[in-house]
């Protein structure tokens, strides 16, 4: 079935889990949010989704240094940018809409549900917009920013090198100061998403490199803007810069997205312009990275949503066997078989939980920018910091699990490429890896985020979960089943797990790091489960779909929380002592 | 790194979890088992493994009704059959080795670890051997059996039709009685593994079809042998039968294995010969299916083992960041990072647990055939029946999880096809679907196997797990950590879950079926965890690799057992009431 952007679910989640109507968003009142999401849905469904399978089958192709995207992609890119979608959150002064991240979260979800490989191109351009807005000089902004916001020129992020993946301290690309104030960049980058393509006449590469006199490690990295074509005095496209695409990767999924090797400085050095200060490139990059991490989480939500829609549609059509208690004659639609229902509800509820967490993170980002007091802005920033690794890792783990369940629901047909279920699984797989692997997210959560402001950010989050539990328990609604109890256990297991980790961090960080991944999952189960409960309580229906999801999540997914807490407490010792078992 | 068949681990598991030295196997004493496994390892590593990537890249190709396998496959098939490997468990009277299933379990694991797409060809031929031995007439056995055992001719299983996947009652392929005692077969089958290929000069199709006067449903299905080429009076290959391959599928993985649409009777009907009795085809098919299900479980073990080996090797070479407490200078191998260790141990320990369950199942099959008393044989048969769905589903779920973790350990490189990690994940995905989806396995376990002999088979299995727990607790070994407690909780959660399910089955089967999948997983955690504990207790080493795996499994994987029991008790109600949430 065709992808449908779930606008009603998006709005309900924004409103009842992420505070759309709680004062931060005067610009989204009076149905403005719904109108914009409806427009985004039309674009996603009408323009991007029809190219999803073509992108997989044709893929991006490389020949003679140039990359050709799949049939229809340049036209779709043109239509998408003409809609102004590149600039949803960009400043109005630079041609953007200046709208909040929360609203854009719904848009990003829709682009990725429609066509993940396509949506990667703008995802990285948006990162460049943010870096230029926050750190670009007046000159750089004047020359480049409007053109990225309009989509006329695209942008990329050039971080990874063969020896420097998760560990950026190891990067070797060099930058030398030129007499005119620019820099000469030399080096090789790999895994550069949309590093070369035919969607735009120019591509702006944001490149991490090291100056000759830079300190070792991450404090000696600078960020440069290195355009594919230099810009002349008159603002027009000039000479080709000294950089080229050396090839593209043959990947498991997202075939439509060219993953490039980029070579800078074959001929003496590519001209680059410093963004921010020398040796302060990493903080600049993290401006982009944090938002990109949330965007990757939203990719996960989009793909998981599409997999869920596809599986429910298939299960409603496909008939096999007779479901227990089936009336009438003949085979039942497989959606009536309890085990298939379990799979479908797992897909639906975990997707909704991931969406809620991502939207909450977007709301926190908005609070960081729009909060009326410095305290509110600071609290927003810290909450965004705390939730970002959870949003990224849980949503992409969920995408992997949900897309794999989607294949399973299709049975043998799921393994055949024509069905499309397999593509969703293959595409989704990268999202848990790039923009910081999910293991890196877990480590970030445990090592840096848990102790933000002496633990105040975490404490505030815990309090907001406990508040949901209190409301749940107060209602004494028999339709809730054991949800209040299971969610309460999950939240208290999170508290307990956090206490354990903080002690371990003080005594032996290795022990804490061994528990980082189960801790992130525990966090997501508690946060996602209570968010779904909020949605269920806001629902005005006897057999509510949010209630079903919330209860299912509590009784079948979040109930694993206590075992995660025990793993955090007990699991590290044999992990750290496993040398013999892990010998080659 | 190249695949290495883990012969030492296989033997240790056979001996200390599956009773290799406990009387059933006089033919495997004095190092015979080790010698044969060493030979199998040579064949797997030297002949099959080198063709693994080629099979994926080239795939099997279809043109003009014929299928061409990838470069080198016919030669490898010839060498493999010359080694006699098709007939490991086949009767000596028909050219087989007459060796036990337990030993062959190691061999099957090795073929699949080396090259899953290749190993599917013999997997199905072995099923045909079993069906012919058990149900074939004297004539059929005389003409065909030796030639399948020797590998001269291959065989297939033709079950699925477009409208009949999990539900064989719906199949429509027709068989009409011919005057000479043969039958005319007409119909279309899909998803026929190695339905057509260039490995052998003839292919024997075992086909399920329906006679004109057959009762409706599964009691009206008969099994036929339908050779691609008819056999002349003199035993030589004769005329082409009225059947053809209509095409092959474009699949997510196992590209080397042709998945065929088979069309029978374009020209009046393909000649087929009845196997067993009319309308009793399904029991005959289940003779093959049960063993094939164990073989698919072993596919899962093989692929998981290979993914684990590959990931450990990569993690030992690849350096990124500094691990906590690292000495010396420079980056640490990522195997030293606690979060990576967690992934690798998850891979290793769950693979070992799946292997132990599969080998236990094979031992039970041997007991069913070799037991010295009717009671022992019956107990073996029932234990095999009980464990088969667990072996199939848990081992293939494990393969999916482990192969996906393997991609994750490789980081960005894992998503690039050149690394090989992605192929393992793509290949593994089908194993949870074919030969009865893992949902079907769970339903089989709950509806048919749990109550075998009034629950005696389950009770015996539970007792054997409790015996392990008692030994664990007796030893009071501090190296065990919380393993005794966590495994005891898992076994008692299994007991509790079983009691719950039996009550639910009596009251409302739909409720029980909603809990079937978590129940199967609970069963596997308890059975796999206690099996690993047996291996750990049998190990004679201070920092034993089995102890590490057993303890890791208990403290990090099996600890989820109580939450699975609670899901079984509580989860069904909202699953069954989820109509609104699952509406299209």
Image (cartoon, coloured by chain):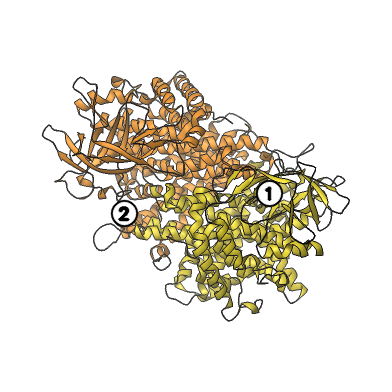
Chain colours: A yellow, B orange
Is A326 on the left-hand or right-hand side of B473? left
Is B143 on the left-hand or right-hand side of A203? left
Is A21 on the left-hand or right-hand side of B293? right
The quadrant of the picture occupied by the C terminus of chain B is bottom left
Residue B137 % position (x, y): 20, 29
Closer to us: A495 or A351: A351
**SS type, badge 2:** loop
Residue B5 % position (x, y): 51, 28
Which residue is identified by label 1? Answer: A513
Closer to us: A31 or B579: A31
The residue marked by circle 2 belongs to what chain? A
Rendered image: mark on residue A345? none
Residue B291 % position (x, y): 35, 36
Q: Earlier in the sequence, mark 2 or mark 1?
A: 2
| Residue at 83% across, 50% down | A183
The quadrant of the picture occupied by the N terminus of chain B is top right
**Above or below, comparing residue A551 to residue A217 in the picture:** below
User: How far apart are the two marked residues, 2 and 1, measured between alpha carbons?
Assistant: 47 Å
Rendered image: mark on residue A320? 2
**Callouts 2 and 1 close, C-beta under 8 Å:** no
Quadrant in the picture for residue B382: top left
**SS type, badge 1:** helix
Closer to us: B361 or A89: A89
Residue B526 % position (x, y): 47, 45
The residue lying furthest to the bottom in this view is: A30
The residue lying furthest to the left in this view is: B179
Choose mark 2 or mark 1, whichever is in front. Answer: 2
Q: Is residue A450 visible?
A: no
How many marks the image carries: the answer is 2
The residue marked by circle 1 belongs to what chain? A
Quadrant in the picture for residue B307: top right
At label 1, counting other C-alpha atoms closer than 10 Å, the crowd grade (few under 14, some 14-19, many 20 or more) is: many
């Amino acid at each position: 079935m065709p992808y449908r952007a779930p606008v009603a679910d998006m709005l309900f989640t924004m409103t009842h889990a992420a505070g759309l109507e709680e004062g931060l968003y005067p610009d989204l009142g009076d149905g403005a949010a719904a109108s914009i999401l409806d427009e985004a849905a039309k674009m996603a469904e009408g323009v991007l989704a029809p190219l999803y399978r073509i992108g997989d089958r044709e893929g991006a192709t490389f020949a003679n240094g140039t990359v050709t995207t799949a049939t229809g992609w340049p036209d779709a890119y043109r239509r998408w940018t003409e809609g102004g979608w590149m600039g949803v959150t960009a400043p109005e002064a630079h041609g953007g809409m200046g709208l909040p991240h929360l609203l854009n979260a719904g848009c990003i979800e829709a682009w990725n549900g429609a066509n993940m490989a396509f949506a990667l191109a703008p995802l990285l351009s948006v990162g460049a917009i943010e870096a230029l807005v926050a750190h670009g000089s007046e000159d750089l902004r004047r020359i480049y920013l409007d053109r990225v916001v309009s989509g006329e020129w695209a942008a990329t992020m050039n971080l990874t090198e063969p020896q420097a993946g998760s560990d950026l301290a190891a990067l070797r690309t060099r930058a030398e100061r030129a007499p005119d104030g620019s820099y000469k960049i030399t080096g090789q980058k790999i895994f550069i998403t949309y590093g070369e393509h035919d969607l735009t006449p120019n591509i702006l590469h944001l490149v991490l490199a090291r100056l000759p006199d830079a300190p070792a490690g991450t404090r000696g990295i600078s960020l440069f803007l290195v355009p594919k074509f230099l810009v002349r005095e008159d603002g027009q496209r000039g000479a080709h810069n000294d950089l080229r695409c050396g090839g593209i990767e043959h990947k498991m999924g997202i075939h439509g997205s060219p993953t490039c090797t980029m070579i800078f400085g074959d001929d003496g050095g590519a001209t680059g312009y410093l963004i921010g200060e020398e040796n302060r490139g990493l903080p600049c990059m993290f401006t982009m990275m944090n938002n990109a991490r949330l965007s990757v989480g939203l990719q996960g939500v989009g793909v998981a949503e599409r997999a869920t829609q596809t599986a429910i549609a298939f299960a409603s059509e496909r008939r096999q066997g007779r479901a227990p208690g089936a009336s009438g004659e003949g085979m039942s639609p497989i959606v009536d078989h309890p085990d298939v229902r379990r799979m479908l509800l797992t897909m639906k509820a975990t997707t909704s939980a991931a969406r809620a967490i991502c939207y909450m993170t977007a709301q926190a980002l908005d609070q960081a920018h729009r909060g009326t007091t410095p305290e509110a802005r600071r609290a927003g920033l810290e909450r965004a910091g705390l939730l970002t690794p959870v949003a990224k890792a849980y949503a992409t783990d969920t995408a992997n699990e949900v897309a794999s369940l989607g294949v399973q629901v299709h049975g043998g047909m799921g393994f055949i490429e024509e069905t499309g279920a397999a593509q969703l699984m293959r595409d989704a797989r990268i999202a848990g890896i790039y923009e910081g692997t999910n293991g890196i997210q877990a480590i970030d959560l445990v090592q840096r985020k848990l102790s933000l402001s002496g633990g105040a950010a975490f404490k505030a989050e815990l309090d907001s979960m406990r508040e949901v539990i209190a409301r749940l328990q107060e209602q004494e609604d028999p339709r809730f089943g054991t949800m209040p109890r299971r969610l309460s256990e999950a939240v208290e297991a999170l508290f307990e797990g956090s206490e354990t980790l903080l002690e371990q961090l003080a005594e032996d960080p290795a022990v804490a790091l061994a528990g980082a991944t189960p801790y992130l999952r525990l966090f997501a189960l508690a946060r996602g489960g209570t968010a779904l409960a909020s949605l269920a309580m806001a629902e005005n229906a006897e057999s509510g779909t949010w209630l079903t999801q919330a209860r299912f999540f509590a009784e079948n997914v979040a109930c694993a929380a206590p075992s995660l807490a025990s793993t955090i407490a007990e699991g590290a010792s044999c992990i750290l002592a496993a040398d013999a078992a892990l010998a080659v």
